[in-house]
Image: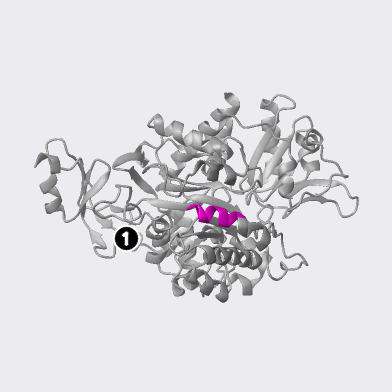
Amino acid sequence: MGNNLADLLLINGNIITMDEEKPRATSIAVKNDTIVFVGKTKDALELKGSSTEVIDLKGQTVMPGFIESHIHPTMYGLNLLQIDCRTENTPSIDEILKKVEEAAKDTPDSEWIKGWGWDDSKLAEKRNPTRWDLDKVAPNHPVVLTRTCTHMAVVNSKALELSGITEETQDPSGGHIEKDSQTGEITGLLQEKAQGLVALPELTFNDILKGMQLAQNDFAKWGITTVHDMSTQKSDMEVYQELLSNNELNVRVRPWYWAVSQNEWSGLLDEVLSLGIKSGFGNDMIKIQGMKFMLDGGIGGRTAALSEPFEGSQSRGILYYDVEEIAPLMEKALLADLRVAIHGIGERAIEVAIQSFEKANKKKDITSMRNRIEHCALPTTEHLQRMKKLELVAGSSIGFLYHIGDSYLANLGPERVERVYPHKSFKDHGIVAPGNSDLPVTGGNPWTGIYAAVTRKTISDQTLDTKQNVSLYDAIKAYTVDAAFSSLEEQSLGSIRPSAKADLIVMAEDPFEIDIEQLVDIQIEKTYLGGKVVYSREQDVPSLNSGQDHMEIQNKQ
Protein backbone atom coordinates (compact mmCIF):
# COMPACT_ATOMS: atom_id res chain seq x y z
CA MET A 1 0.00 0.00 0.00
CA GLY A 2 2.78 2.42 0.99
CA ASN A 3 4.38 2.18 -2.45
CA ASN A 4 1.18 3.52 -4.01
CA LEU A 5 1.08 6.67 -1.90
CA ALA A 6 1.69 9.99 -3.62
CA ASP A 7 4.69 12.26 -3.11
CA LEU A 8 2.58 15.33 -3.90
CA LEU A 9 -1.12 16.13 -3.86
CA LEU A 10 -2.62 19.25 -5.41
CA ILE A 11 -6.18 19.47 -4.06
CA ASN A 12 -9.23 21.75 -4.23
CA GLY A 13 -8.21 23.23 -7.55
CA ASN A 14 -9.72 24.05 -10.92
CA ILE A 15 -7.81 21.61 -13.12
CA ILE A 16 -7.97 22.17 -16.89
CA THR A 17 -6.52 18.86 -18.06
CA MET A 18 -6.49 19.34 -21.88
CA ASP A 19 -7.48 15.65 -21.88
CA GLU A 20 -10.76 15.36 -23.79
CA GLU A 21 -11.74 12.21 -21.89
CA LYS A 22 -11.68 14.09 -18.56
CA PRO A 23 -11.52 17.84 -19.28
CA ARG A 24 -11.87 19.09 -15.67
CA ALA A 25 -10.90 17.84 -12.22
CA THR A 26 -10.22 19.21 -8.74
CA SER A 27 -7.09 17.27 -7.70
CA ILE A 28 -3.87 15.72 -8.97
CA ALA A 29 -1.62 13.11 -7.36
CA VAL A 30 2.05 12.87 -8.30
CA LYS A 31 4.56 10.09 -7.58
CA ASN A 32 8.21 10.60 -8.49
CA ASP A 33 7.87 12.88 -11.55
CA THR A 34 4.66 11.40 -12.93
CA ILE A 35 0.93 12.03 -12.50
CA VAL A 36 -0.75 8.95 -11.00
CA PHE A 37 -4.26 10.30 -10.39
CA VAL A 38 -6.54 13.02 -11.74
CA GLY A 39 -10.01 13.43 -10.27
CA LYS A 40 -11.91 14.48 -7.16
CA THR A 41 -10.23 15.70 -3.99
CA LYS A 42 -11.78 13.07 -1.72
CA ASP A 43 -10.38 10.30 -3.93
CA ALA A 44 -6.97 11.96 -4.19
CA LEU A 45 -6.67 12.15 -0.39
CA GLU A 46 -6.76 8.34 -0.25
CA LEU A 47 -3.24 8.49 -1.72
CA LYS A 48 -1.95 10.67 1.13
CA GLY A 49 0.79 9.21 3.30
CA SER A 50 2.81 10.57 6.20
CA SER A 51 5.43 12.04 3.87
CA THR A 52 3.05 13.28 1.15
CA GLU A 53 3.21 17.02 0.46
CA VAL A 54 -0.31 18.41 0.20
CA ILE A 55 -0.94 21.73 -1.54
CA ASP A 56 -4.38 23.24 -1.11
CA LEU A 57 -4.93 25.21 -4.31
CA LYS A 58 -7.95 27.03 -2.85
CA GLY A 59 -9.64 27.23 -6.23
CA GLN A 60 -6.61 28.26 -8.26
CA THR A 61 -6.44 27.03 -11.85
CA VAL A 62 -3.94 24.39 -13.01
CA MET A 63 -3.05 23.60 -16.62
CA PRO A 64 -0.35 21.51 -18.33
CA GLY A 65 2.99 23.30 -18.69
CA PHE A 66 3.43 25.05 -22.02
CA ILE A 67 5.55 23.49 -24.74
CA GLU A 68 7.40 26.00 -26.91
CA SER A 69 7.68 24.19 -30.23
CA HIS A 70 10.18 26.53 -31.89
CA ILE A 71 12.65 28.77 -30.07
CA HIS A 72 16.40 29.35 -29.79
CA PRO A 73 17.08 28.96 -26.05
CA THR A 74 20.80 29.69 -25.89
CA MET A 75 20.52 32.54 -28.39
CA TYR A 76 17.89 34.12 -26.14
CA GLY A 77 20.16 33.49 -23.16
CA LEU A 78 23.09 35.20 -24.87
CA ASN A 79 20.79 38.10 -25.73
CA LEU A 80 20.11 38.53 -22.04
CA LEU A 81 23.82 39.25 -21.67
CA GLN A 82 23.65 41.97 -24.37
CA ILE A 83 22.05 45.39 -24.78
CA ASP A 84 18.28 44.95 -24.90
CA CYS A 85 17.11 47.03 -27.89
CA ARG A 86 13.51 45.86 -27.88
CA THR A 87 11.04 48.67 -28.45
CA GLU A 88 9.63 48.58 -24.92
CA ASN A 89 13.13 49.43 -23.65
CA THR A 90 14.46 51.58 -26.51
CA PRO A 91 11.55 53.16 -28.44
CA SER A 92 13.83 55.26 -30.65
CA ILE A 93 17.24 55.16 -32.29
CA ASP A 94 18.30 57.90 -29.87
CA GLU A 95 17.47 55.60 -26.95
CA ILE A 96 19.41 52.74 -28.56
CA LEU A 97 22.41 55.03 -28.97
CA LYS A 98 22.24 56.01 -25.29
CA LYS A 99 22.46 52.31 -24.35
CA VAL A 100 25.39 51.77 -26.73
CA GLU A 101 27.15 54.84 -25.31
CA GLU A 102 26.68 53.52 -21.75
CA ALA A 103 28.07 50.13 -22.76
CA ALA A 104 31.06 51.77 -24.44
CA LYS A 105 32.01 53.50 -21.18
CA ASP A 106 32.18 50.10 -19.41
CA THR A 107 33.86 48.17 -22.24
CA PRO A 108 37.57 48.34 -23.10
CA ASP A 109 38.37 49.86 -26.52
CA SER A 110 38.28 47.39 -29.43
CA GLU A 111 36.12 44.90 -27.50
CA TRP A 112 32.79 44.08 -29.15
CA ILE A 113 29.50 45.62 -28.03
CA LYS A 114 26.48 43.50 -28.97
CA GLY A 115 22.78 44.19 -28.81
CA TRP A 116 19.53 42.69 -30.04
CA GLY A 117 15.82 43.24 -30.57
CA TRP A 118 15.44 46.52 -32.50
CA ASP A 119 12.53 46.77 -34.91
CA ASP A 120 12.56 49.64 -37.40
CA SER A 121 8.78 49.41 -37.87
CA LYS A 122 8.29 50.27 -34.19
CA LEU A 123 11.09 52.81 -33.72
CA ALA A 124 10.07 56.47 -33.51
CA GLU A 125 12.22 57.25 -36.57
CA LYS A 126 10.64 54.41 -38.62
CA ARG A 127 14.03 53.48 -40.10
CA ASN A 128 16.96 51.17 -39.50
CA PRO A 129 19.90 52.40 -37.42
CA THR A 130 23.04 52.98 -39.50
CA ARG A 131 26.78 52.66 -39.06
CA TRP A 132 26.98 56.46 -38.81
CA ASP A 133 24.51 56.50 -35.91
CA LEU A 134 26.63 53.97 -34.04
CA ASP A 135 29.90 55.69 -34.90
CA LYS A 136 28.76 58.81 -33.02
CA VAL A 137 28.59 57.00 -29.68
CA ALA A 138 31.12 54.15 -30.06
CA PRO A 139 33.79 55.08 -32.61
CA ASN A 140 36.46 52.93 -30.92
CA HIS A 141 34.40 49.79 -30.36
CA PRO A 142 33.09 47.33 -32.93
CA VAL A 143 29.30 47.30 -32.53
CA VAL A 144 26.72 44.83 -33.88
CA LEU A 145 22.99 45.13 -33.16
CA THR A 146 20.79 42.31 -34.43
CA ARG A 147 17.22 43.05 -35.53
CA THR A 148 14.37 41.32 -33.70
CA CYS A 149 13.83 38.92 -36.63
CA THR A 150 17.54 37.87 -36.55
CA HIS A 151 17.54 38.09 -40.35
CA MET A 152 19.61 41.25 -40.36
CA ALA A 153 21.97 43.29 -38.23
CA VAL A 154 23.51 46.75 -38.26
CA VAL A 155 27.22 47.26 -37.57
CA ASN A 156 29.39 50.34 -37.17
CA SER A 157 32.51 51.37 -39.08
CA LYS A 158 34.88 49.73 -36.58
CA ALA A 159 33.06 46.40 -37.00
CA LEU A 160 33.23 46.72 -40.80
CA GLU A 161 36.95 47.49 -40.58
CA LEU A 162 37.74 44.53 -38.30
CA SER A 163 35.65 42.24 -40.53
CA GLY A 164 37.32 43.40 -43.75
CA ILE A 165 34.00 44.50 -45.28
CA THR A 166 34.42 47.32 -47.82
CA GLU A 167 32.44 48.84 -50.71
CA GLU A 168 34.19 46.30 -52.95
CA THR A 169 32.99 43.29 -50.90
CA GLN A 170 30.55 41.22 -52.95
CA ASP A 171 27.20 40.10 -51.57
CA PRO A 172 27.45 36.50 -50.36
CA SER A 173 24.97 34.06 -51.90
CA GLY A 174 21.70 34.47 -50.02
CA GLY A 175 22.77 37.74 -48.39
CA HIS A 176 22.96 41.47 -49.02
CA ILE A 177 25.24 44.32 -47.90
CA GLU A 178 23.08 47.43 -48.06
CA LYS A 179 24.55 50.54 -49.69
CA ASP A 180 23.34 54.12 -49.73
CA SER A 181 21.45 54.68 -52.99
CA GLN A 182 23.04 58.13 -53.44
CA THR A 183 26.65 57.65 -52.37
CA GLY A 184 27.17 53.90 -52.73
CA GLU A 185 28.57 53.75 -49.19
CA ILE A 186 27.84 50.78 -46.95
CA THR A 187 25.08 51.75 -44.50
CA GLY A 188 26.04 49.08 -41.96
CA LEU A 189 22.91 47.00 -42.57
CA LEU A 190 23.72 43.36 -43.33
CA GLN A 191 20.89 41.09 -44.44
CA GLU A 192 20.62 37.32 -44.12
CA LYS A 193 23.90 35.52 -44.94
CA ALA A 194 25.83 38.81 -45.08
CA GLN A 195 25.68 38.73 -41.27
CA GLY A 196 28.12 35.84 -41.46
CA LEU A 197 30.81 38.23 -42.77
CA VAL A 198 31.08 39.89 -39.35
CA ALA A 199 34.26 38.76 -37.55
CA LEU A 200 32.70 38.23 -34.14
CA PRO A 201 34.85 36.61 -31.46
CA GLU A 202 34.05 32.99 -30.63
CA LEU A 203 31.57 32.56 -27.81
CA THR A 204 32.88 30.73 -24.78
CA PHE A 205 31.24 27.79 -23.05
CA ASN A 206 30.71 29.94 -19.95
CA ASP A 207 28.98 32.66 -21.99
CA ILE A 208 26.44 30.15 -23.30
CA LEU A 209 26.05 28.45 -19.92
CA LYS A 210 25.47 31.73 -18.09
CA GLY A 211 22.94 32.83 -20.71
CA MET A 212 21.01 29.55 -20.60
CA GLN A 213 20.77 29.73 -16.82
CA LEU A 214 19.11 33.13 -17.17
CA ALA A 215 16.91 32.00 -20.07
CA GLN A 216 15.45 29.03 -18.25
CA ASN A 217 14.42 31.31 -15.38
CA ASP A 218 12.28 33.20 -17.87
CA PHE A 219 10.88 29.99 -19.37
CA ALA A 220 9.72 28.89 -15.91
CA LYS A 221 8.24 32.32 -15.24
CA TRP A 222 6.20 32.04 -18.44
CA GLY A 223 5.03 28.51 -17.57
CA ILE A 224 7.12 26.86 -20.29
CA THR A 225 8.28 23.38 -19.28
CA THR A 226 9.53 22.05 -22.64
CA VAL A 227 11.41 23.88 -25.41
CA HIS A 228 12.27 22.82 -28.95
CA ASP A 229 15.71 24.22 -29.80
CA MET A 230 15.55 24.89 -33.54
CA SER A 231 19.23 25.62 -34.18
CA THR A 232 21.12 23.20 -31.95
CA GLN A 233 24.91 23.33 -32.15
CA LYS A 234 27.62 21.26 -30.44
CA SER A 235 28.09 23.99 -27.82
CA ASP A 236 24.36 23.99 -27.02
CA MET A 237 24.37 20.25 -26.40
CA GLU A 238 27.39 20.63 -24.13
CA VAL A 239 25.59 23.29 -22.09
CA TYR A 240 22.36 21.28 -21.81
CA GLN A 241 24.29 18.22 -20.66
CA GLU A 242 26.33 20.23 -18.17
CA LEU A 243 23.16 21.65 -16.61
CA LEU A 244 21.55 18.19 -16.57
CA SER A 245 24.57 16.51 -14.95
CA ASN A 246 24.60 19.23 -12.27
CA ASN A 247 20.85 18.81 -11.70
CA GLU A 248 20.38 22.43 -12.82
CA LEU A 249 18.35 21.94 -16.00
CA ASN A 250 14.80 23.04 -15.19
CA VAL A 251 13.23 22.80 -18.63
CA ARG A 252 12.92 19.82 -20.98
CA VAL A 253 14.91 20.37 -24.17
CA ARG A 254 14.07 18.96 -27.58
CA PRO A 255 17.08 19.66 -29.85
CA TRP A 256 16.83 19.98 -33.63
CA TYR A 257 20.36 19.93 -35.05
CA TRP A 258 21.14 22.72 -37.53
CA ALA A 259 21.69 20.91 -40.84
CA VAL A 260 23.46 23.23 -43.31
CA SER A 261 25.93 26.04 -42.50
CA GLN A 262 23.95 29.29 -42.53
CA ASN A 263 23.29 32.43 -40.43
CA GLU A 264 26.33 32.04 -38.15
CA TRP A 265 25.47 28.38 -37.39
CA SER A 266 27.56 25.41 -38.51
CA GLY A 267 25.87 22.65 -40.49
CA LEU A 268 25.90 19.33 -38.65
CA LEU A 269 24.04 17.01 -41.04
CA ASP A 270 27.03 14.85 -42.01
CA GLU A 271 28.33 14.66 -38.42
CA VAL A 272 24.96 13.55 -37.04
CA LEU A 273 24.51 11.02 -39.83
CA SER A 274 28.00 9.61 -39.26
CA LEU A 275 27.18 8.96 -35.60
CA GLY A 276 24.02 7.01 -36.43
CA ILE A 277 21.85 9.18 -34.15
CA LYS A 278 18.13 8.82 -34.78
CA SER A 279 15.14 10.90 -33.72
CA GLY A 280 14.01 10.05 -30.19
CA PHE A 281 17.48 9.37 -28.81
CA GLY A 282 17.93 10.67 -25.28
CA ASN A 283 15.85 10.80 -22.12
CA ASP A 284 12.87 12.69 -20.69
CA MET A 285 14.95 15.84 -20.20
CA ILE A 286 16.94 15.95 -23.46
CA LYS A 287 15.58 14.10 -26.48
CA ILE A 288 16.92 14.50 -30.04
CA GLN A 289 14.25 15.49 -32.57
CA GLY A 290 16.00 15.61 -35.95
CA MET A 291 17.51 18.07 -38.44
CA LYS A 292 16.55 21.69 -39.10
CA PHE A 293 16.85 23.24 -42.57
CA MET A 294 16.12 26.80 -43.72
CA LEU A 295 14.72 28.04 -47.03
CA ASP A 296 13.99 31.75 -46.76
CA GLY A 297 14.04 34.81 -44.53
CA GLY A 298 11.26 36.67 -42.74
CA ILE A 299 8.35 38.98 -43.53
CA GLY A 300 9.30 41.71 -41.04
CA GLY A 301 12.66 42.22 -42.77
CA ARG A 302 11.18 41.62 -46.25
CA THR A 303 13.38 38.59 -46.96
CA ALA A 304 10.73 35.81 -47.03
CA ALA A 305 10.38 34.13 -50.45
CA LEU A 306 6.94 35.33 -51.55
CA SER A 307 5.07 34.49 -54.74
CA GLU A 308 4.17 38.18 -55.25
CA PRO A 309 6.27 41.23 -54.28
CA PHE A 310 6.15 42.92 -50.90
CA GLU A 311 3.88 45.96 -50.71
CA GLY A 312 5.34 48.96 -52.55
CA SER A 313 8.29 46.92 -53.81
CA GLN A 314 9.49 44.74 -56.66
CA SER A 315 11.21 42.37 -54.25
CA ARG A 316 9.86 38.85 -53.67
CA GLY A 317 12.43 38.09 -50.98
CA ILE A 318 15.26 35.58 -50.90
CA LEU A 319 14.98 31.82 -51.58
CA TYR A 320 18.13 30.09 -50.34
CA TYR A 321 17.76 26.75 -52.14
CA ASP A 322 15.73 25.17 -54.90
CA VAL A 323 14.33 21.63 -54.76
CA GLU A 324 17.33 20.13 -56.57
CA GLU A 325 19.68 21.53 -53.93
CA ILE A 326 17.76 20.90 -50.71
CA ALA A 327 15.77 17.70 -51.42
CA PRO A 328 18.83 15.36 -51.49
CA LEU A 329 19.99 16.73 -48.12
CA MET A 330 16.57 16.31 -46.55
CA GLU A 331 16.34 12.83 -48.01
CA LYS A 332 19.63 11.85 -46.38
CA ALA A 333 18.19 12.69 -42.99
CA LEU A 334 14.77 11.12 -43.57
CA LEU A 335 16.21 7.84 -44.85
CA ALA A 336 18.37 7.71 -41.69
CA ASP A 337 15.27 8.03 -39.45
CA LEU A 338 16.00 11.64 -38.61
CA ARG A 339 12.91 13.81 -38.73
CA VAL A 340 13.10 17.05 -40.70
CA ALA A 341 11.90 20.53 -39.77
CA ILE A 342 12.33 23.08 -42.53
CA HIS A 343 11.89 26.85 -42.26
CA GLY A 344 9.47 28.02 -44.95
CA ILE A 345 7.65 31.34 -44.58
CA GLY A 346 6.75 32.59 -48.07
CA GLU A 347 4.78 30.63 -50.66
CA ARG A 348 7.87 29.90 -52.79
CA ALA A 349 9.72 28.46 -49.79
CA ILE A 350 6.73 26.36 -48.69
CA GLU A 351 6.45 24.99 -52.23
CA VAL A 352 10.12 23.93 -52.21
CA ALA A 353 9.66 22.30 -48.79
CA ILE A 354 6.59 20.31 -49.86
CA GLN A 355 8.14 19.21 -53.16
CA SER A 356 11.23 18.03 -51.28
CA PHE A 357 9.14 16.01 -48.81
CA GLU A 358 7.14 14.56 -51.71
CA LYS A 359 10.34 13.40 -53.42
CA ALA A 360 11.55 11.71 -50.23
CA ASN A 361 8.15 10.09 -49.70
CA LYS A 362 8.57 8.21 -53.00
CA LYS A 363 11.61 6.43 -51.51
CA LYS A 364 10.28 5.94 -47.99
CA ASP A 365 6.88 6.42 -46.37
CA ILE A 366 7.47 9.48 -44.20
CA THR A 367 3.82 10.12 -43.29
CA SER A 368 4.16 8.78 -39.73
CA MET A 369 7.33 10.76 -38.89
CA ARG A 370 5.59 14.08 -38.10
CA ASN A 371 8.00 16.11 -40.18
CA ARG A 372 7.49 19.84 -39.99
CA ILE A 373 7.38 23.06 -41.98
CA GLU A 374 8.50 25.79 -39.58
CA HIS A 375 6.56 29.06 -39.43
CA CYS A 376 4.50 28.06 -42.49
CA ALA A 377 3.22 31.62 -42.73
CA LEU A 378 1.58 31.80 -46.15
CA PRO A 379 0.50 28.35 -47.37
CA THR A 380 -1.98 28.23 -50.22
CA THR A 381 -5.03 25.96 -50.12
CA GLU A 382 -3.19 23.56 -52.43
CA HIS A 383 -0.22 23.58 -50.08
CA LEU A 384 -2.46 22.63 -47.17
CA GLN A 385 -3.96 19.73 -49.11
CA ARG A 386 -0.51 18.38 -50.00
CA MET A 387 0.75 18.90 -46.43
CA LYS A 388 -2.13 16.81 -45.12
CA LYS A 389 -1.33 13.99 -47.56
CA LEU A 390 2.20 13.89 -46.12
CA GLU A 391 0.89 14.39 -42.54
CA LEU A 392 3.24 17.33 -42.12
CA VAL A 393 3.11 19.45 -38.97
CA ALA A 394 2.90 23.25 -39.32
CA GLY A 395 5.22 24.81 -36.74
CA SER A 396 3.12 27.96 -36.73
CA SER A 397 4.64 31.18 -35.36
CA ILE A 398 1.29 32.57 -34.29
CA GLY A 399 3.08 34.71 -31.68
CA PHE A 400 4.40 36.83 -34.56
CA LEU A 401 0.93 38.27 -35.17
CA TYR A 402 0.83 39.86 -31.73
CA HIS A 403 4.39 41.14 -31.60
CA ILE A 404 5.15 42.10 -35.21
CA GLY A 405 1.77 41.78 -36.91
CA ASP A 406 1.72 45.50 -37.73
CA SER A 407 4.81 45.06 -39.92
CA TYR A 408 3.15 42.05 -41.57
CA LEU A 409 0.19 44.22 -42.54
CA ALA A 410 2.50 46.93 -43.87
CA ASN A 411 4.65 44.46 -45.82
CA LEU A 412 1.93 42.14 -47.14
CA GLY A 413 -1.23 44.24 -47.32
CA PRO A 414 -4.68 43.31 -45.96
CA GLU A 415 -5.50 40.55 -48.47
CA ARG A 416 -2.44 38.40 -47.77
CA VAL A 417 -2.57 39.06 -44.01
CA GLU A 418 -5.94 37.26 -43.99
CA ARG A 419 -4.12 33.99 -44.62
CA VAL A 420 -0.98 34.46 -42.49
CA TYR A 421 -0.47 31.72 -39.87
CA PRO A 422 -3.91 30.36 -40.84
CA HIS A 423 -4.89 28.38 -37.76
CA LYS A 424 -8.50 27.91 -38.79
CA SER A 425 -7.39 26.62 -42.21
CA PHE A 426 -4.85 24.32 -40.54
CA LYS A 427 -7.64 22.90 -38.39
CA ASP A 428 -10.08 22.61 -41.32
CA HIS A 429 -7.47 20.57 -43.23
CA GLY A 430 -6.64 18.36 -40.24
CA ILE A 431 -3.10 19.74 -39.94
CA VAL A 432 -1.61 19.83 -36.44
CA ALA A 433 -0.17 23.30 -35.85
CA PRO A 434 1.72 23.83 -32.58
CA GLY A 435 2.16 27.51 -31.76
CA ASN A 436 5.47 29.24 -31.16
CA SER A 437 7.21 32.58 -30.69
CA ASP A 438 10.59 31.82 -32.32
CA LEU A 439 12.09 33.52 -29.24
CA PRO A 440 14.15 35.75 -29.35
CA VAL A 441 12.58 36.85 -32.64
CA THR A 442 9.46 37.79 -30.66
CA GLY A 443 8.53 37.72 -26.98
CA GLY A 444 8.40 34.28 -25.40
CA ASN A 445 5.25 34.48 -23.23
CA PRO A 446 2.86 31.87 -24.73
CA TRP A 447 -0.21 33.86 -23.68
CA THR A 448 0.58 36.44 -26.38
CA GLY A 449 0.48 33.73 -29.05
CA ILE A 450 -2.71 32.26 -27.58
CA TYR A 451 -4.29 35.72 -27.57
CA ALA A 452 -3.28 36.29 -31.20
CA ALA A 453 -4.72 32.94 -32.31
CA VAL A 454 -8.07 33.83 -30.74
CA THR A 455 -8.32 37.54 -31.62
CA ARG A 456 -5.94 37.99 -34.59
CA LYS A 457 -4.92 41.27 -32.95
CA THR A 458 -1.51 42.92 -32.76
CA ILE A 459 0.21 44.56 -29.81
CA SER A 460 -1.15 47.92 -31.06
CA ASP A 461 -4.72 46.52 -30.85
CA GLN A 462 -5.04 46.33 -34.63
CA THR A 463 -7.26 43.48 -35.90
CA LEU A 464 -5.50 41.85 -38.84
CA ASP A 465 -8.40 39.69 -39.99
CA THR A 466 -11.55 37.92 -38.83
CA LYS A 467 -11.17 34.75 -40.92
CA GLN A 468 -8.48 32.69 -39.17
CA ASN A 469 -9.59 33.00 -35.53
CA VAL A 470 -9.77 29.80 -33.47
CA SER A 471 -11.33 29.06 -30.09
CA LEU A 472 -9.46 29.63 -26.85
CA TYR A 473 -9.39 25.87 -26.30
CA ASP A 474 -7.74 25.28 -29.68
CA ALA A 475 -5.28 28.11 -29.07
CA ILE A 476 -4.19 26.61 -25.72
CA LYS A 477 -4.09 23.18 -27.38
CA ALA A 478 -1.52 24.57 -29.84
CA TYR A 479 0.88 25.17 -26.92
CA THR A 480 0.14 21.92 -25.09
CA VAL A 481 -1.41 18.86 -26.76
CA ASP A 482 -0.48 19.78 -30.34
CA ALA A 483 3.06 20.73 -29.37
CA ALA A 484 3.45 17.38 -27.58
CA PHE A 485 2.12 15.62 -30.69
CA SER A 486 4.82 17.33 -32.75
CA SER A 487 7.52 15.43 -30.81
CA LEU A 488 5.51 12.15 -30.62
CA GLU A 489 5.08 12.69 -26.88
CA GLU A 490 1.34 13.29 -26.55
CA GLN A 491 1.05 10.45 -24.02
CA SER A 492 3.61 11.96 -21.64
CA LEU A 493 3.50 15.72 -22.22
CA GLY A 494 0.94 18.42 -22.95
CA SER A 495 -2.00 17.16 -20.87
CA ILE A 496 -2.84 16.28 -17.28
CA ARG A 497 -3.56 12.56 -17.17
CA PRO A 498 -2.25 9.49 -15.34
CA SER A 499 1.19 8.42 -16.68
CA ALA A 500 1.97 11.93 -18.01
CA LYS A 501 4.84 13.93 -16.57
CA ALA A 502 3.82 16.29 -13.76
CA ASP A 503 4.64 19.44 -15.74
CA LEU A 504 2.07 21.91 -14.43
CA ILE A 505 1.34 25.61 -14.18
CA VAL A 506 -0.78 27.27 -11.48
CA MET A 507 -2.67 30.52 -12.11
CA ALA A 508 -5.01 32.68 -10.05
CA GLU A 509 -7.39 33.08 -13.02
CA ASP A 510 -9.21 30.60 -15.22
CA PRO A 511 -8.45 31.73 -18.79
CA PHE A 512 -11.89 30.52 -19.89
CA GLU A 513 -13.63 32.75 -17.34
CA ILE A 514 -11.89 36.09 -17.88
CA ASP A 515 -12.30 38.68 -20.62
CA ILE A 516 -10.33 37.64 -23.69
CA GLU A 517 -8.40 40.94 -23.58
CA GLN A 518 -6.97 39.93 -20.19
CA LEU A 519 -5.22 36.81 -21.54
CA VAL A 520 -1.92 38.62 -22.15
CA ASP A 521 -1.88 39.77 -18.51
CA ILE A 522 -2.20 36.31 -16.95
CA GLN A 523 0.55 35.69 -14.38
CA ILE A 524 1.91 32.26 -13.58
CA GLU A 525 1.87 31.66 -9.83
CA LYS A 526 3.88 28.42 -9.87
CA THR A 527 5.49 26.18 -12.45
CA TYR A 528 6.16 22.51 -11.74
CA LEU A 529 8.54 20.35 -13.76
CA GLY A 530 8.14 16.66 -12.95
CA GLY A 531 6.36 17.59 -9.73
CA LYS A 532 9.13 19.94 -8.54
CA VAL A 533 8.63 23.71 -8.27
CA VAL A 534 10.91 25.51 -10.72
CA TYR A 535 9.20 28.90 -10.41
CA SER A 536 7.16 30.57 -7.71
CA ARG A 537 5.86 34.09 -8.20
CA GLU A 538 6.04 34.67 -4.44
CA GLN A 539 9.79 34.14 -4.53
CA ASP A 540 10.46 35.78 -7.90
CA VAL A 541 13.30 38.32 -7.95
CA PRO A 542 12.38 40.94 -10.59
CA SER A 543 16.00 41.71 -11.53
CA LEU A 544 16.45 38.17 -12.79
CA ASN A 545 13.93 38.77 -15.56
CA SER A 546 15.09 42.03 -17.08
CA GLY A 547 17.40 41.95 -20.08
CA GLN A 548 18.92 45.31 -19.13
CA ASP A 549 19.65 44.11 -15.60
CA HIS A 550 21.46 41.14 -17.13
CA MET A 551 23.54 43.57 -19.18
CA GLU A 552 24.44 45.61 -16.12
CA ILE A 553 25.34 42.47 -14.17
CA GLN A 554 27.60 41.30 -16.98
CA ASN A 555 29.34 44.68 -17.24
CA LYS A 556 30.04 44.66 -13.52
CA GLN A 557 31.52 41.20 -13.79
Report whether 284 appears left or right of 149. left
Quarter of the image where one finds residue 141: top right
* x and y, in percent, of residue 314 in the image: 78, 67
Residue type at mark 1 is Met
* Residue 521 occupies quadrant: bottom left
Residue located 66% across and 70% down the image: 413
Give the SS element for disc 1.
loop
**Left or right side of 180 for 440:** left
With respect to residue 344, does 101 lie above or below?
above
Bounds of the magenta segment: 329-339
Residue 486 among those drawn in magenta: no
Q: Quadrant of the C terminus?
A: top right
- Name the residue: 51% across, 43% down: 73
- In front of the other: 127 or 30: 30
For the view shown, which residue lies furthest in the left direction?
1
Q: Is residue 338 magenta?
A: yes
Q: How many marks?
A: 1
Residue named by callout 1: 18
Would you call the spot at circle 1 few (<14 residues within 10 Å), some (14-19), or many (20 or more)? many
Residue 547 drawn at (x, y percent): 55, 39
Give percent across and percent down for residue 175: 74, 51
x, y (%) of residue 529?
A: 34, 43
Determine whether 152 is above or below 543 in the image: below
- In front here: 175 or 98? 175
State whether residue 360 is above or below residue 276: below
Identify the residue at image location x=37%, y=54%: 489
Q: How is the image coloured?
A: one colour
Dominant secondary-structure state across the stretch colored magenta: helix
On the rendered image, what quadrant is the N terminus found in? top left
Left or right: 414 in relation to 76: right
